């Protein structure tokens, strides 16, 4: 496996772990940083904000994957 793919898989693992940890924190906390009690609706809003924040790294990872695929294709 080439260095580009190894780096891509490591980066994906880090992003997946960060997203999982963030999701766990959002869904298990009772009170947020401002002292507001979290209802299921507020937890959903916080999760959607987290999801939107992870769209940028997802886009970068997809572009990186396309570049890796084009490099591996025989000319």
Image (cartoon, rainbow, N blue to C red):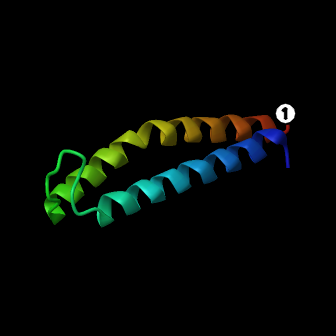
Check disc 1 and report the residue beneath it.
75
Give residue 59's position: percent from left, percent from top: 49, 38
Q: Which sits in the foreground, 73 or 25? A: 25
The image quarter containing residue 34 is: top left
Residue pictured at 24% horizontal, 47% vertical: 33
Residue pictured at 85% horizontal, 49% vertical: 1
Give residue 3's position: percent from left, percent from top: 82, 40
Image: 61 above or below 37: above
Instruction: Give left or right: position of 73 versus 22.
Output: right
Instruction: Give left or right: position of 16 versus 72.
Output: left
Give residue 71's position: percent from left, percent from top: 78, 35
Give residue 12's position: percent from left, percent from top: 61, 49
Q: Is residue 1 visible?
A: yes
The image quarter containing residue 28 is: bottom left
The C terminus lies in quadrant: top right
Residue pictured at 25% horizontal, 51% vertical: 46
Could you say whether the residue bearing mark 1 is in a helix, strand or loop? loop
The image quarter containing residue 73 is: top right
Image: 38 above or below 59: below
Instruction: Give left or right: position of 30 versus 4.
Output: left
Q: Is residue 73 visible?
A: no
């Amino acid at each position: 496996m080439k260095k580009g793919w190894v780096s891509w898989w490591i980066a994906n693992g880090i992003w997946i772990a960060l997203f999982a940890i963030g999701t766990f924190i959002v869904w298990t906390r009772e009170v947020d940083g401002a002292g507001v009690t979290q209802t299921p609706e507020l937890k959903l809003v916080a999760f959607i904000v987290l999801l939107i924040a992870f769209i940028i790294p997802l886009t970068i990872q997809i572009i990186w994957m396309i570049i890796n695929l084009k490099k591996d294709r025989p000319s």
